[in-house]
Image (cartoon, rainbow, N blue to C red):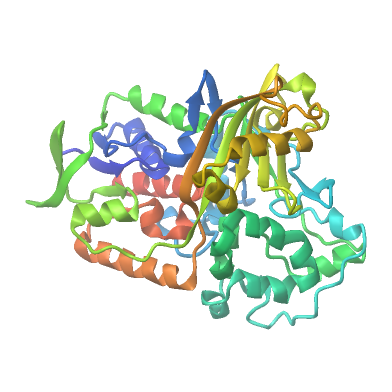
Amino acid sequence: MPDALLVGNNLAVLVAAAELGAVGREVVLVTDGRPAGGHFRGLRLDGADFDIGMVLLESAAAPEETADLSNYRPRMRYDWTRFGALVDRWLDGQVDQVRTPTPEVLVDGRRWPDHLIANRLDLLAAGGFPAPPPLPRDDARHAAAKVTSGAYDTLTYQAAADLNHGTGIQRQLIDPFAEKLLGPAYDGLAARYHRAGWLPLYWPETLTAAIEGRPTHLAEYPFWTTGTGFVGELVRSLEQRIADLPTVRVCGAAVDSMAPAAGGWEVRTAEGAWSHARPVLGVGHERAQALLGLPGRERAPGASVVAVCCLVRAAAMGAPIGCLSVVDREFITYRVTDQDALAGRDPEWHRVVIEAGPAAADRLRDGEDVPAALVSELCRLLALPEGVAHDGPSPDVRVVRTLSAPGAVLAPTAGSLAADAAANQALVEACPAAELTGALLGGGATSMNDQVVQGLAVAQRLA
């Protein structure tokens, strides 16, 4: 019996395998026939490494690290931030990090520092926006209470945003982006999980101060990438670390069965069978339910994504950008990410990903040439030579691959969160000894930093 049996391919089990192997524990990692790292792995296309859309590293380091990993609370949104110093140190040991330029947004045809994910409110200070209506700080619906208030167990994002932002700001600066990204799923998005759609929820006092030109005391939220501009490098680094560890065995075969056995649970694959008293699960809900013979659960509504991975000639870009969120409704594109610009690199050809939402996915399914339409928009957004995307393939843009992912962006609702909790309880009852990670802990526990914390916590417990 190994010291640790890890089943799945998410980032958390990779972190745990590397950390346990580093201290000499005998580890078996069964990836269940899936590429290790999941979404964070990225893709290698035509010799270039692409992240799948905007994938950035975050930091929320506290001055002193006082949190105990055993007290990580995955159902408390943003709980990973208590372990920010630990996550930062761990990431520093894996990849070289580079601070990215401030993301930007396109509003009414003009670029501004980003107010959606970076907390920059310069746009409001430019004038013309109505202040949000007053909302007392002791009101349970105030954004200050979004993590702890019971009101946020049922409040939708749209309702909370209207209360805290006012309809004027919300309708002009946020709703158009949200509707493009999430489509019909936007209607029920749970307020506490607004970051699932990269949407802000500011205090009304903060917005009023910005409108009036007063200090907001709100710092820009910083982002990092790797020195290569490819965040998937983190997964590759972990895979190499694991490959170099003599006490870690990686089995890439699919799991045939997982069942109780003497002294624990037995996992069988075509490559072998292993038993452990406390297996660690890093698979998705549907896969876990299938392996344990459990009924399915209500899945959170999801928004389909179309991502066009391109190589763009650097010299042709009249208005280059690292990361641009497109609020303007005239575009079906909702975001453009240039991995090389984010890392401060300037090769001849930049890796650029164009992202669009459910409307683009519907058009693609109906047989429309959506990649050409998105490249046409890219030419406008980056000020590439006029007309090239309309008259045929652009000599300055090479489309490497178009990806379509149905339901890829989950938009948790009050109902789906309750279903998550019930499914989690059913998993615990079916396999009480298992260590759960990633999506098995709920929709709010799947971010990169959450999974790093989970992997480190698992390694600490099993070491």
Q: Nearer the viewer, residue 245 or 45?
A: 45
Q: How many marks?
A: 0
Give the quarter of the figure containing the C terminus.
top left
Q: Residue at x 26, y 32 (%)?
A: 252
Which of the 4 image quadrants contains residue 54?
top right
State whether residue 47 is above or below residue 321: above
> Is 355 on the left or on the right of 125, as rendered?
left
> Is 246 on the left or on the right of 358, as rendered?
left
> Is 13 on the left or on the right of 80, as rendered?
left
The percent position of residue 422, horizontal first and vertical second, equals 33, 70
> Is 430 on the left or on the right of 332, as rendered?
left
Which of the 4 image quadrants contains residue 53?
top right
Which of the 4 image quadrants contains residue 169?
bottom right
The percent position of residue 357, horizontal first and vertical second, equals 58, 50
Q: Nearer the viewer, residue 315 or 367?
A: 367
The percent position of residue 155, horizontal first and vertical second, equals 57, 76
Q: Residue at x 92, y 64 (%)?
A: 128
State whether residue 448 is above or below residue 429: above
The percent position of residue 277, horizontal first and vertical second, equals 17, 50
